[in-house]
């Protein structure tokens, strides 16, 4: 899975927000707030990766149980796909 | 992109979240903000704006982000950094104020000394820039007339 090009993550006031740029800003008008895990996964999936790779990366970064990491990654990927942000 | 979202109302976002973070649209704040490249951070207006502040206001249904030149009774005199006409904007049309922005990937605060120096310089050099544009426009118009005259002779 890979997130489409045309977004940047901005850190403002300690929070991460996804902002569209270029052509993407003509179609996407919302504001996406990310928590710490979401910001990590957004950056990770800005490059093509599998869910398993996402789980491994999340575990390496936050030292969490595999079942928790997998649930987080699958939920994130599902949200990205259903929102039309995945390539 | 096939996925398209509804246009959000920035005043609703400001009321609910206390901040709006989004892309820039348009060229009226060049060279500070480039169309659809940079990011603005706007907070709700809680007090009267002052000279150099960048106001977010509504002109009909459109959102406009321009700089305050002067606070006057009942509103403001406002102009974009890349514009050559002033606008009288009523107080109630102003919904927010720019507090931070990202130019390319560099993060600026509107309280930065460097930024304030830029804003002052932009206003100070307005008449010079306008004069330059008029001269440049005049030269092009004159050159165009000569070219047309030469073509007619041929």
Image (cartoon, coloured by chain):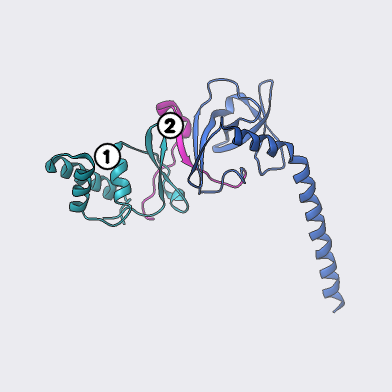
Residue drawn at (74%, 40%) of the image:
B125
Residue drawn at (20%, 52%) of the image:
A51
Residue A12, placed above or below residue B75? below
Q: Which residue is mark 1?
A: A37
Task: Looking at the picture, tell me which residue is in the foreground, B123 or B108.
Answer: B108
The label nearer to you, 1 versus 2, is 1
Instruction: State which chain disc 1 sits on.
Output: A
User: Which percent across, then down, holds residue B59?
Assistant: 59, 35
Left or right of residue B17, residue B85 in this image:
right
Residue A61, placed above or below residue B20? below
Which chain wears cyan?
A
Decide whether residue B11 is among the magenta residues. Answer: yes
Decide whether residue A23 is among the magenta residues. Answer: no
Which chain wears blue?
B
User: Which percent across, then down, holds residue B67?
Assistant: 63, 34
Q: How many marks?
A: 2
Q: Which residue is mark 2?
A: B13
Range covered by the magenta-colored residues = B1-28
Instruction: State which chain disc 2 sits on.
Output: B
């Amino acid at each position: 899975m890979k997130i489409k090009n045309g977004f940047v993550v901005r850190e403002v006031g300690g929070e991460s927000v996804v902002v569209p740029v270029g052509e993407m800003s003509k179609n996407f008008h919302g504001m996406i707030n990310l928590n710490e895990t979401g910001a990590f996964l957004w950056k990770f999936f800005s490059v093509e990766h599998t869910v398993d790779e996402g789980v491994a990366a999340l575990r390496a970064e936050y030292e969490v149980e595999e079942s928790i990491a997998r649930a987080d990654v699958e939920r994130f990927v599902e949200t990205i796909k259903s929102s039309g942000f995945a390539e | 992109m096939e996925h398209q979202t509804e246009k959000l109302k920035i005043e609703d976002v400001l009321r609910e979240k206390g901040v709006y973070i989004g892309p820039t649209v348009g060229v009226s704040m060049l060279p500070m903000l480039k169309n659809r490249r940079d990011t603005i951070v706007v907070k709700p207006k809680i007090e009267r704006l002052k000279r150099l502040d960048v106001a977010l206001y509504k002109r009909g249904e459109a959102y406009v982000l321009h700089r305050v030149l002067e606070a006057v009774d009942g509103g403001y005199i406002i102009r974009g950094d890349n514009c050559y006409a002033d606008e009288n904007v009523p107080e109630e049309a102003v919904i927010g104020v720019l507090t931070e922005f990202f130019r390319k990937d560099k993060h600026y605060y509107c309280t930065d000394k460097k930024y304030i120096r830029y804003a002052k310089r932009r206003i100070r050099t307005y008449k010079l820039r306008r004069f330059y544009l008029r001269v440049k426009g005049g030269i092009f118009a004159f050159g165009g007339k000569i070219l047309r005259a030469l073509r007619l002779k041929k």
